[in-house]
Amino acid sequence: MWSRESFVDAVRKHDAAVAKRGVEVWVGSEPTFTDRLDLGAEWQSTALGGGKEARAQTLSCELWRQMAGSVMLRSLGRRYPGEDEPRWNFGLYRRRDGVRIWDGPLDPMLAPDANQYTTALDVWAAALVDAFVACGWTARTTLAPDSLGHRVSLWIEADATESLDFDLHAPSSGACIDLPRIHEVSACQAILGCIAQSAQACGLPTLVIGGESPPVDDTVELTTITPDPAVIEINTAPSANATEFLQRSLVIYAAATLEGLSPYRLYFNGAIADSGGGGQITLGGRSPLASPFVSEPRLLSRLVRFLNRHPSLSYLYSHDFVGSSGQSARADERGTSAVDELVLALDLLDREPNPTPELQWKTLAPFLCDASGNNHRAEINIEKLWNPFLPGRGQMGLVEFRALRMQHTPERATALACLLRALAAMLATARYELPLIDWGRELHQRFALPFYLEQDLQAVLDALAKAGLGLDPAIEDVLRREEFRRWADVSLPGSTLELRRALEFWPLLGDAASPEQGGTSRLVDSSTKRVELRLRPDDDDVAGDWREWEASVRGVVLPWRSEHDEHGELRVYALRYRSFAPFAGLHPSLGAQTPIKLALRHPTRGLERTIVLHEWKPGNEPYPGLPDDLADAAARRSERIEVLEGMPDQSTMADDESRQRQIARGLGEYCFDLRYLG
C-alpha cells in the first residue's frame, strides 16, 4: 500500500523521468465540487441559484489565504444560451516567483469588517489619472456613459489611437473598478500597481476589481472559481510539473472540504458517483509555441492512435455518461465509416514533413468531436490547440482529456496527470505507427467491463515501463483503486463472487443539435444498467472445483469466460438489465426487471444458492437520508444483495421456440442482455 510520503517521492521520480526525455509538459485541471447533502436545484442540475455564490465566495477566500501574493478578482464569467447575465467568476491572480502582485485595498469578501466607502469617485478618478501619468502614460477622466460613475481612459503610448477604458463606480459593497481587456502581462502588472497606489492615496478601505480577466503567461497564474450545473468548478492555473500539480491539488481539495464541498456524491442506495461536474486534465506548455503538441508535431497523431488502441484511457476513469453522445466521445464511436476516414486523415498527416499546428487542427478536428460535430465533447478536445475560429482562446497549444470523472482525492487526480504526462513524453520522443483498430461492437461490449479495462491499463503501464517512463508502484496503486464501481463480494464455498458496476452507454433522446439538447446538459435514457460478475477461487481451494460453479438467470446458463489476472485464474461475465421504467426513454413497453435473481449451482458438491440483486433497499423501504460517508454507502450497497439457500423458482418459464430466439439475441460473448426476455 502507498503512503503520502511514498506517493510524493514517486511523483518526483516521474517528473525527473519526463525531464530526462527533454520534453516540457505543463498540466492543468478543472476540479468540480458539490454539496452532496443538499438536494437544491443548484447542487443537482442548475448552474446558479440558492447559496452557491456565497459558498464560492467563502471557498475563494480560503484559497486566497493559501495562495500568497494573490489579488482577488471578480471578472466577467461565461454566458450560455438562455442565460440573462454572465455567470459570476472569482479569480486569484498572482506572480509565479512569489513576489506580491497587489498592495492595494482588499476585496470586501476578504475584509468584511472594513469601514464603508467615503471617498468621492471623482477624487479617486483624478488620483488614478495622476498615477497613470506618473508612469509615463496619457490618461483622462470623464463621466461614465450611465452617469453612475467615472471612466478613466488610458493611452499606453502618446500617439495611440485606441484607449483602455476603466469604469469606476460605487455599488453598495464599496468602490469598484472594471478592467478592460489587457493583452500584455507587464502592462497589466503596472496598471494594477497604479490602481493600488491611487486607491491607497484616497484611503479606500476595500476595492472590487471586476471587468475582463487579466492576461497570463509563464510568469503569472490565474485560478478561477465559477458555477456549472450542480457544482462549483475551479479552473486551476497550469502546473509546470506533477509535483506542483499535486501541491496545488492538495490545497484545493482541502479548501473545498473546509467549505463542506465534496468531489463525489453518494446516492440513497449507496451507489457512488462523481461530483456531477468533470475532472478534465489539460496538457500544454509554458506558452503556445512551447507546447509539446506544437514543438513535437507528430505527438498528436500518435496520441490519437494510442488512445484508439487502449480503451481503458477512455472508460476506466470516466464519468457515468459515456458513448457517442456523451461528454467525451471517442472518434471511433461514430461508426466504421468515421474510422476509415480517420485512417486516411492520419496517413495524409504523416506524409507532411513538418505539419503545422493549424494543419493538425484542420485535419483532426472533424474527427475529434461528438456525433453532432461538437469538438468540446470529444475525448481528445483540441478546440484550443490551434483553432482560428475561437478568438483569444483557440491558439494556445492545449489538448484537453475529457474522459475523466472528478477524482475523489488529490492523489488520484495527480496519478492521472502523471499517466497522461508520461504518455505525452513517450509519444513525443518515440515513433508509434501501429494502425487504428476498428473495435466495432467489441468496444461497447468487452470494454464495458472493468476487468478488461484493467487488463488494458496494465498494457499501457507496461508500454511506459518499456519506454523508460514507467510509473512508480505508489502511483500505480492509486491508479488501480476501484471503489468507484465496487458493489460487493459474496462468499461462496471455495470461491468468491465479486460484483462491480460496469459501464453503460446511455442513448441520447432526440437530436443532439436540437434546442432541447443544445445546452450544458442533455436528456438521456439512463435506465439500463450493467453489472460485472467475477468468480475466483479461495486460497484453500486446492482441488480447483470452484470451476464447477454454474450461474444462470431466469433459467439461462451464463457462459463464463475463463481469464487470468495478477491474482490468478478467474471467470468473468456480465448482466445487462432495465433498472427502472423512465418517464421518457427507449422501449416504452419494457418495464423494470429488478430485482435480479442469479442462481448458482455446484453439481459436485450439491450446493445451490440464489443471489438477489436489488436496486433499492430490500422490501422497498425508504432510506433515512443520504449516506453519511463512503463506509455507510458501502454498507447500503452490501445490503442490496441477498444470499439465499436453494434455487429460484423457474417453473413458469416456457421453453418454446420464441424464448430460444430471445435468449440467442440477448446472450452475447461478454454479457447477457436480459431486456430481450422482457
Image (cartoon, helix red, strand yellow):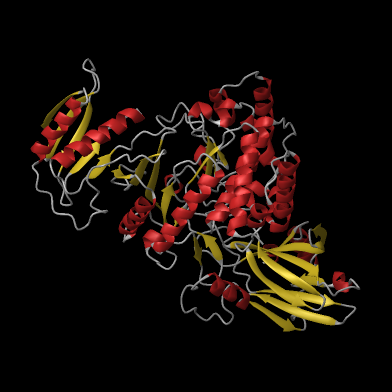
Q: Quadrant of residue 130?
A: top left
Visible residue check, residue 139: yes
Image x and y of residue 593, in percent: 63, 70
Q: Which residue occupies the foreground of this view, 235 or 348?
A: 235
Image x and y of residue 156, in percent: 25, 22
Visible residue check, residue 146: no
Image x and y of residue 486, in percent: 64, 65
Q: Residue at x 49, y 51 (%)?
A: 249
Q: In the figure, is residue 430 to the left or right of 240?
A: right
Q: In the figure, is residue 88 to the left or right of 527?
A: left
Q: In the figure, is residue 524 to the left or right of 563?
A: left
Q: Which residue occupies the foreground of this view, 218 or 268?
A: 218
Single out the residue that lies furthest toward the bottom.
645
Report the number of discs.
0
Quarter in which the C terminus is drawn: bottom right
Q: Which residue occupies the foreground of this view, 560 or 440?
A: 560
Question: Residue 110, relative to residue 193: is it above or below?
Answer: below
Question: Residue 595, relative to residue 227: is it above or below?
Answer: below
Image x and y of residue 126, in percent: 11, 33
Q: In the figure, is residue 238 to the left or right of 215?
A: right
